[in-house]
């Protein structure tokens, strides 16, 4: 089987899934040995370390990089496939073992959540070329920076919810995404922004959510962009105007099953390059692949067919 001839590097985030990944490593390692035979592995010890581990592994000849963690871990490893805005090795492939609290991206690749099935899947699934997104934005210190993302970048409510989740974790309080989402909806009403798509004015208004989607699902299973495809060379742009808490309670379920695109407060479009500018002095937070990274203004550009992954696209 092809995977037995690959040089495989496993990158493990032991802190993912609230530390359960580290506790389960002996079990995970046993299953990996059963299906993949030979591999090396590293544990991450700090944020963004997976980027460097992945980049070094590819430069040292790794053909298959397997991430064990959640969406944030997958994002970091994917960033390690690039250097100076170029893919280091176009033949290198990303495989993922879901072991995080969200794992929204892996749903779009049909990767099973069960450990044994996920590793078996990596050993058998074909390589697929997918698009990735590149975002240029302002970091927490107001400095311009750029980063790649696999799944979805969004501004507004999503960034606020992740900020609350992170804050509650630091306070060692329960950090349920849904709990923080409901709490944010009670106070957060959205922000005034202006958007362009492929250098044409796309929208301007007061929006609760703005999602620039490569994948379909975010927020622990919400189908924010049900028509998005990972290999169509386009972002799906989803804009949701401000909702009252009552409106959210009455219509929020539509986000879960992807039927919200017909709701009168939702706008849907597509583009290869999306730019978003804040029109109010308050910071508008951004999150990408489940991590709150900075704030607007931001530019989002699709990088077509730039990453090989193990999966069946849907």
Image (tube, rainbow, N blue to C red):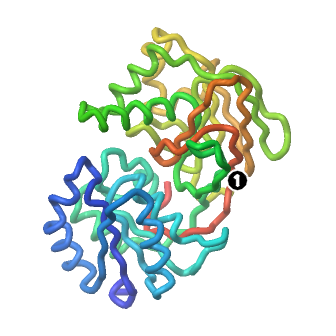
Q: Which residue is at 30% across, 32% downward?
A: 176
Give residue 277's quadrant in the image. Answer: top right
Number of numbered discs:
1
Task: Name the spot of residue 248 as percent of width and height, x first.
Answer: 47, 16
Image quadrant where one finds the N terminus: bottom left
Q: Which residue is at 71% across, 47% downward?
A: 299
**From the viewer's perspective, is residue 59 above or below residue 44?**
below
Q: Residue furthest bottom?
A: 5
Reading the image, the residue beneath label 1 is: 301
Disc 1 is placed on an element classified as: strand
**From the viewer's perspective, is residue 238 above or below residue 301?**
above
Res. 113 in view: yes
Q: Which residue is at 83% across, 35% downward?
A: 201
Q: Residue furthest front?
A: 141
- Binning the other alpha carbons within 10 Å of mark 1 as few (below 14), some (14 to 19) or many (20 upward) gives many
Residue 276 or residue 255, whichever sits in front: 276
Task: Name the spot of residue 7 as percent of width and height, x first.
Answer: 39, 86
């Amino acid at each position: 089987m092809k995977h037995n001839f690959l040089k495989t590097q496993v990158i493990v985030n032991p802190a993912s899934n609230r530390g359960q990944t580290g506790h389960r490593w002996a079990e995970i390692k046993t299953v990996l040995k059963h299906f993949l035979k030979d591999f090396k592995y590293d544990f991450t010890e700090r944020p963004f370390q997976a980027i460097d581990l992945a980049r070094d592994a590819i430069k040292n000849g790794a053909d298959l990089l397997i991430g064990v963690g959640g969406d944030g871990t997958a994002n970091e490893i994917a960033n390690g496939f690039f250097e100076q805005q170029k893919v280091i090795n176009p033949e290198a492939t990303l495989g993922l073992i879901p072991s995080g609290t969200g794992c929204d991206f892996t749903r779009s690749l049909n990767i099973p959540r069960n450990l044994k099935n996920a590793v078996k899947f990596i050993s058998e699934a074909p390589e697929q070329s997918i698009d990735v997104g590149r975002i240029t934005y302002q970091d927490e210190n107001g400095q311009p920076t750029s980063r790649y993302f696999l799944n979805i970048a969004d501004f507004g409510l999503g960034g606020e919810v992740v900020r609350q989740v992170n804050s509650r974790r630091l306070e060692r309080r329960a950090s349920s995404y849904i709990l923080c989402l409901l709490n944010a909806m009670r106070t957060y009403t959205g922000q005034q922004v202006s958007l362009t798509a492929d250098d044409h004015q796309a929208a301007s208004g007061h929006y609760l959510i703005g999602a620039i989607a490569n994948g379909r699902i975010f927020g622990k299973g919400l189908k924010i962009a049900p028509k998005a495809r990972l290999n169509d060379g386009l972002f799906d742009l989803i804009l949701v105007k401000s909702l009252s808490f009552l409106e959210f309670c009455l219509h929020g379920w539509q986000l879960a099953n992807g039927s919200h695109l017909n709701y009168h407060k939702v706008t849907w479009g597509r583009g290869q390059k999306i730019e978003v500018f804040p029109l109010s002095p308050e910071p508008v937070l951004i999150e990408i692949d489940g991590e709150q990274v900075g704030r607007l203004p931001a530019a989002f550009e699709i990088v077509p067919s730039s990453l090989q992954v193990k999966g069946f696209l849907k």
